[in-house]
Image (cartoon, rainbow, N blue to C red):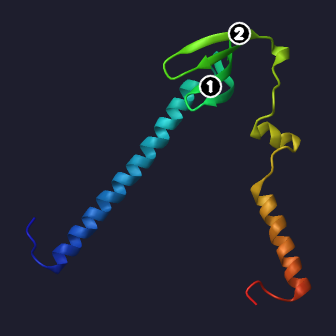
Amino acid sequence: MIILGSGSNFLQFIIVLLIFIFVLALTYFVTKWLAGYQQGNVTNKNIRTIETYRITQNKFIQIVQIGKKYVAISVCKDTVAFITELDEEDILFLPSAEEGALYGGAVDFAEVFAKVKDKAKELKEKTGKTKDE
C-alpha cells in the first residue's frame, strides 16, 4: 500500500479495525449456529448418555440408554466395549441442575450473592466501618 499521509494511515487503520470486527462477529454467529445445529442432531434421539465416569485420562465407563434398555460400556482411545446390560431399577437417577432447581437442590448465584451483600451491609452498619478503614 502506498502511504499518502497521516489521514490515509488513520483511514487504513479504521478499515482494518472494521474488517477485524466483522470477522469476529461472523465467527461468533457461525459458532452459535453450529452449536445449535449439532445440539439439534443430538437431542430427542434413541441413544442418550446417562452418566460417564473417568477411569484414567482416556478410559471411561458410561451408562447409555439405547431405546428402553440401559447398558454399561467401556470407552477407550480406540475401542468401545460392551460390559453389561442394566435394569432400570439398578440405576440411581440424580436430578440434573434444571430438575434440581425445581426441588430446591440447585442454588441460584444471584440469591447467594444478594445474601452475602446483605450480610456485608449489616456488618458495616454494626461496626460503622468500611473494609478500607
The picture quadrant where one finds residue 67 is top right
Q: Left or right: 125 with respect to 41?
A: right
Q: Left or right: 15 with respect to 121?
A: left
Secondary-structure class at tag 1:
strand
* Nearer to me, 26 or 133: 133
Q: Residue 65, can we see it?
A: yes
Earlier residue among tags 1 and 2: 1
Image coordinates for residue 110, horizontal then vertical, percent:
76, 59
Q: Residues within 10 Å of mark 2 (few under 14, many from 20)?
A: few
Give the residue type at disc 1: Phe
Residue at the front extreme of this rendering: 56
Q: Quadrant of the C terminus?
A: bottom right
Q: Residues within 10 Å of mark 1 (few under 14, many from 20)?
A: some
Q: Residue at x 80, y 71 (%)?
A: 117
Q: Which residue is mark 1?
A: 60
Q: Give the numbered dot on residue 84.
A: 2
Q: Left or right: 95 with respect to 16?
A: right
**Placement of 53 over or under 127, stated as above or below:** above
Image coordinates for residue 126, horizontal then vertical, percent:
91, 84
Image coordinates for residue 4, horizontal then vertical, percent:
9, 75
The picture quadrant where one finds residue 44 is top right
Q: Give the numbered dot on residue 110.
A: none
**Placement of 111 over or under 14, stated as above or below:** above
Q: Residue at x 76, y 35 (%)?
A: 96
Q: Left or right: 10 with respect to 36?
A: left
Label 1 – label 2 distance at C-alpha: 14 Å
Secondary-structure class at tag 2:
strand
